[in-house]
């Protein structure tokens, strides 16, 4: 529970990102190379001029450790890292959350159909899931992202711009379906043989009613156990894709893109890369600890295993 | 047993065909956009687009396009990049494989050794503080993004503590071929190996601890205790041995996933010119033929590695043979 509250705290802080940005008076999505701020009564440009003659270009200001005043310093384009950190967290958590819902919904649907009806439907679904399962997730995600991010996607009336958050959500939601669908299918198959389902069939209940009233409630525990695990896994995947520049697109931020921005500043302004990483570790760790506890409480036989990134 | 092995190999071929079709569909048949424009990269001229169309046979039916692509990648190997005109993709990918394998094998050695040690120690002190501490450290290891850990490592070894006595030996970023200098190869890879293995040490130590703890509840352990065997012997010979089965299965799966995922990110952070870095560079300038090739080669490697693990498993474990 303590772990869950850490995650909720992070979520609330990130949700307040617009409030922080307007309070600090910064625009986290526009480069501000000529801004000047006041630190301890002294005026300082956000982008400092090189001190020695040999250094080329500007160097962004380091952390001031003053809330609302470039707390964590600026990035390469003079943007407030703290504000971007909060916005980025909001994006990371939103993407991970919606992707988790997508994965669970589709996986449940596929698992129910395959496990309950068996036969041809099961064969087709299982084979497709086998292929997706054997496909290393990052490679699948890279293939999907690179194709969609080059030009966006146009599918009939649906038109998704290449910078849209919907693309990473869709991609991350898709790649983890087999991880959830397989255990769900197995469970549905064994429930199908259980006495109470047989009794329901004998009573003449329709398949829809059996799925809804008898099978789904029994599968729901597994699904609940999956929620924190999938959230953690999705956050790691999203940040990795964004780090590879195929997740959230600039000027929008996510913790992964901020780490990438920070890579070139690593030796001079390490906090740009350090801070989002610490946020990722804290959120994922709290989700994993909470997930462990939830699993021990709801699923003592440990049917659900910690996913592999 | 022969039947079981053949069955597994047939499954492997099925999955490989499935993956290649999926990759084909993703790259060539994602709706809405001209695939030639994707392959040619940003702001390609009409001539280049035309060359792409002819070279991939976009006027042909889908199955011919699929076969053309497979032939280019696996048979003739004459797939060329359109972003860097005329650059042969397949030899470039093959050149980077030794770097990736050096990285992955070294990390695998570290992760097996340390996760067995940590898992056994945690199981031996289960529910006391060393166990709890190790398991929390393991969970932190699992929760860290590997590329970020790599950057922290770089910050420590390349900048902050570069001139101190305990990290002064770390060479600048980059790869040194083994044939050129075995010592240089080793030193260049130590930090990447540690970075890459930390995630897996955490995961495996936790799995191993759980399965040893479970094995210790079994009847044969009680028998061993009744025979008067020492607790150390019971732990190391009786409990660890059966627990390693779960460990080995997982290892096969993850070794593959490692090649296709975390290794890519590690290579990027440490500037090692492996398959992952090649993919990353291609991602930066949207050079799709390169990505297509690395994705297919890497995923085929993963599928084959998994099949090999399963076959070894069939040979080792009599219970699986008849199944």
Image (cartoon, rainbow, N blue to C red):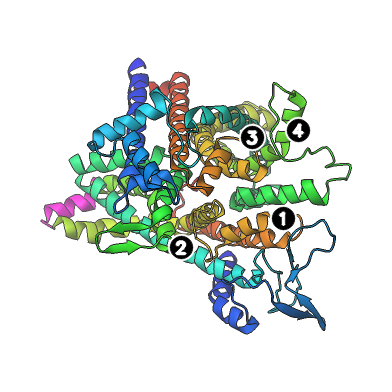
Q: Compared to B285, does A162 lie above or below?
A: below
Q: Chain of mark 3?
A: B
Residue to which mark 1 is pinned = A266
Q: Are the residues under marks 4 and 3 on the same chain?
A: yes
| Disc 2 versus disc 1: nearer the observer | 1
Query: Where, by quadrant of the figure, is residue B122 drawn?
Result: top right
Span highlighted in magenta in the image: A193-205
Closest to the observer, A234 or B138: A234
Residue to which mark 3 is pinned = B107
Question: How far apart, in angstroms, are the residues tagged by discs 1 and 4?
Answer: 22 Å
Q: Is residue A196 magenta?
A: yes
Residue to which mark 2 is pinned = A95
Question: How far apart, in angstroms, are the residues tagged by discs 3 and 1?
Answer: 24 Å
Sequence-earlier tag: 2 or 1: 2
Question: How far apart, in angstroms, are the residues tagged by discs 2 and 1?
Answer: 27 Å
For residue A125, say whether it is visible. yes
Q: Chain of mark 2?
A: A
Residue B94 x %, y %: 53, 27
| Disc 4 versus disc 3: nearer the observer | 4
Q: Which mark is residue B187?
A: 4
Q: Compared to A188, does A53 lie above or below?
A: below
């Amino acid at each position: 529970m303590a772990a869950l509250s850490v995650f909720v705290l992070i979520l609330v802080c990130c949700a307040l990102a617009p409030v922080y940005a307007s309070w600090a008076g910064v625009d986290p999505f526009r480069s501000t190379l000529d801004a000047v701020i006041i630190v301890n009564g002294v005026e300082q440009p956000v982008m400092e001029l090189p001190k020695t003659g040999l250094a080329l270009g500007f160097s962004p200001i380091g952390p001031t450790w003053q809330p609302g005043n470039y707390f964590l310093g600026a990035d390469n384009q003079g943007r407030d890292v703290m504000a971007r950190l909060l916005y980025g967290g909001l994006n990371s958590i939103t993407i991970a959350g919606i992707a988790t819902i997508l994965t669970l919904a589709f996986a449940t649907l596929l698992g129910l159909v395959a496990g309950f009806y068996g036969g041809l439907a099961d064969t087709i679904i299982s084979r497709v899931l086998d292929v997706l399962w054997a496909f290393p997730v990052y490679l699948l995600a890279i293939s999907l992202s690179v194709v969609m991010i080059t030009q966006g996607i146009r599918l009939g009336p649906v038109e998704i711009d290449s910078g849209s958050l919907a693309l990473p959500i869709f991609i991350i939601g898709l790649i983890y379906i087999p991880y959830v669908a397989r255990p769900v299918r197995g469970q549905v198959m064994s429930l199908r043989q259980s006495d109470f389902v047989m009794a329901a069939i004998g009573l003449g209940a329709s398949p829809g009613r059996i799925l809804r009233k008898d099978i789904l409630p029994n599968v729901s525990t597994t699904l609940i156990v999956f929620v924190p695990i999938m959230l953690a896994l999705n956050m790691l995947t999203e940040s990795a894709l964004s780090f590879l520049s195929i997740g959230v697109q600039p000027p929008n931020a996510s913790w992964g893109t901020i780490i990438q921005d920070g890579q070139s500043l690593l030796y001079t302004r390490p906090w740009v890369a350090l801070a989002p990483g610490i946020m990722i570790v804290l959120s994922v760790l709290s989700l994993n600890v909470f997930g462990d506890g939830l699993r021990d409480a709801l699923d003592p036989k440990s049917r659900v295993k910690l996913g592999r990134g | 047993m022969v039947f079981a092995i053949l069955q597994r190999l047939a499954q492997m071929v099925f999955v490989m065909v499935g993956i290649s079709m999926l990759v084909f569909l993703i790259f060539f048949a994602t709706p809405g956009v001209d695939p030639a424009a994707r392959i040619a990269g940003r702001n390609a001229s009409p001539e280049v687009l035309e060359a792409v169309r002819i070279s991939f046979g976009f006027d042909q039916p889908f199955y011919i396009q699929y076969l053309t692509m497979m032939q280019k990648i696996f048979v003739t190997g004459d797939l060329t990049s359109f972003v860097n005109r005329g650059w042969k993709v397949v030899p470039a990918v093959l050149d980077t494989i030794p770097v990736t394998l050096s990285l992955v094998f070294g990390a695998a050695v570290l992760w097996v050794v340390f996760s067995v040690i940590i898992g056994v120690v945690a199981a031996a002190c289960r529910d006391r503080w060393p166990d709890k501490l190790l398991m929390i450290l393991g969970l932190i290891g699992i929760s860290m993004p590997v590329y970020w850990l790599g950057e922290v490592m770089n910050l420590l070894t390349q900048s902050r503590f570069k001139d101190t006595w305990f990290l002064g030996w770390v060479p600048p970023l980059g790869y040194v071929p083994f044939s050129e200098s075995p010592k240089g190869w080793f030193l260049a890879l130590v930090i990447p190996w540690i970075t890459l293995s930390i995630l897996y040490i955490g995961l495996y130590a936790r799995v191993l601890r759980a399965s040893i703890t479970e094995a210790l509840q079994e009847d044969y352990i009680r028998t061993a205790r009744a025979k008067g065997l020492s607790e150390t012997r019971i732990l190391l010979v009786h409990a660890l041995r059966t627990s390693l089965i779960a460990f080995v299965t997982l290892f096969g799966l993850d070794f593959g996933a490692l090649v296709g995922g975390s290794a890519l990110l590690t290579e990027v952070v440490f500037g090692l010119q492996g398959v992952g870095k090649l993919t990353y560079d291609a991602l930066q300038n949207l050079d799709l033929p390169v990505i297509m090739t690395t994705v297919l080669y890497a995923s085929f490697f993963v599928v084959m590695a998994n099949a090999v693990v399963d076959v070894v498993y069939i040979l080792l474990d009599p219970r699986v043979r008849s199944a």
